[in-house]
Image (cartoon, helix red, strand yellow):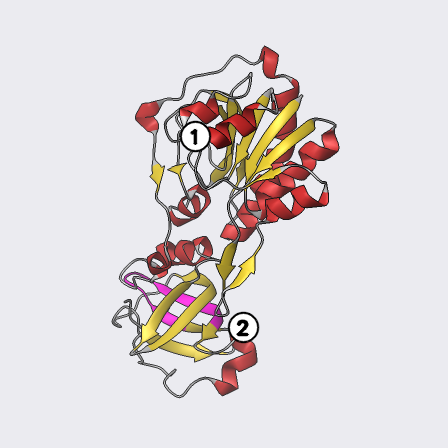
């Protein structure tokens, strides 16, 4: 089968590699433009671009889908387009290019968590199960007919990173199976009444609200690891929290107050229960586990100090 592939991040590149190795013909790849990152604003090449170049696959990084871009893509005479975390909305004239249309790999059990950040929202809401959905794309966001689905459990210690890895390993074989049987699959309508939505995440969304329960905040911290990383402040000093676990304990302290400190954690009062913070990143420092910095904590980090949201 002749395939156009559209994707950008590392997990999309993993599926692209699986397609290349499967024997299907990847005729061309679409990906986002290179981005400048970090303090030095160095140009960082998109992972899917790097893989396409490695295999000498024609590459396109269109800023928009104008008539010129559409005509270029039509020349490949593709049977189907596979879209996985491309990061751009495809207009109808692009969806109509391949003979079999476009299919999308979505990292949730649709109709749950349509939108830009399903993995983060699954973790934020304490879901016990996630999965991969492969749908026939239409003009709306993640509303197309279902072609295939597979699920996996969300572990109590899963982070955004580990759940992404799980779902990527689930996506690759499901994609190949779907492509191999595409002519025999009967698409199924989604139940739109049960749809939920995941908005695009910004860095400011990672500010911890200590009035929430310790269980909710633990989910919050796992959801934002490794990006954008949950944070709070002591006065003007920022503290990032990479890893923590809830503790069911009663207290009378103000939410955000440091209740106790030992080599196992920084214990912080929540609206209900407390949080044992195990991996921290103090401003200007690398992330470290509490045991390694227990005897060298900043002067302000002491019992009764209050951590705050923005």
Q: Residues within 10 Å of mark 2 (few under 14, many from 20)?
A: some
Q: Is residue 197 visible?
A: yes
Which type of secondary structure does the marked residue at label 2 adopt?
A: strand
User: Which mark is drawn over residue 110?
Assistant: 1
Q: Residue 238, how many percent across, how many down?
A: 37, 74
Residue range in magenta is: 267-280
In this image, 177 relative to 243: left or right?
right
Residue drawn at (31%, 80%) of the image: 305
Q: Does 242 appear in magenta? A: no
Instruction: Using the image, determine if residue 179 lies above or below residue 274.
Output: above
Residue drawn at (36%, 85%) of the image: 300
Instruction: Using the image, determine if residue 307 lies above or below residue 220.
Output: below
In this image, 205 relative to 254: left or right?
right
User: Which mark is drawn over residue 289?
Assistant: 2
Which type of secondary structure does the marked residue at label 1 adopt?
A: loop
Q: Nearer the viewer, residue 68 or 28?
A: 68
Q: Quadrant of the C terminus?
A: bottom left
């Amino acid at each position: 089968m002749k395939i156009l592939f559209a994707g950008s991040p590392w997990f999309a590149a993993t599926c692209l590699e699986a397609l290349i190795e499967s024997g299907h013909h990847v005729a061309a790849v679409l990906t986002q433009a290179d981005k400048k990152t970090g303090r030095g604003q160095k140009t960082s090449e998109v992972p899917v671009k790097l893989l396409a170049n490695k295999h000498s696959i024609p590459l396109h990084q269109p800023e928009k889908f104008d008539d010129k871009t559409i005509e270029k893509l039509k020349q490949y005479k593709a049977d189907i387009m596979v879209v996985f975390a491309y990061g751009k909305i495809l207009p109808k004239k692009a969806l109509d290019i391949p003979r079999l249309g476009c299919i999308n790999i979505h990292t949730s059990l649709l109709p749950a968590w349509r939108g830009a950040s399903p993995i983060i929202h699954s973790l934020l809401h304490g879901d016990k199960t996630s999965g991969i959905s492969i749908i026939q794309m239409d003009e709306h966001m993640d509303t197309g007919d279902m072609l295939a689905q597979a699920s996996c459990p969300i572990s109590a210690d899963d982070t955004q990173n580990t759940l992404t890895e799980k779902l990527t390993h689930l996506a690759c074989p499901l994609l190949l199976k779907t492509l191999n049987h595409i002519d025999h699959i009967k698409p199924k309508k989604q139940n739109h009444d049960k749809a939920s939505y995941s908005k695009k995440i910004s860095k400011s969304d990672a500010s911890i609200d200590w009035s929430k329960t310790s269980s909710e905040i633990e989910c919050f911290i796992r959801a934002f690891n490794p990006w954008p990383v949950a944070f709070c402040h002591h006065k003007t000093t920022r503290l990032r929290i990479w890893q923590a676990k809830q503790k069911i304990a009663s207290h009378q302290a103000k939410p955000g107050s440091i209740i106790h400190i030992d080599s196992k954690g920084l214990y912080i009062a929540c609206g209900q229960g407390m949080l044992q913070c195990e991996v921290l990143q103090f401003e200007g420092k690398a992330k470290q586990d509490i045991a390694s910095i227990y005897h060298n904590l900043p002067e302000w980090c002491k019992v009764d100090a209050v951590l705050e949201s923005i």
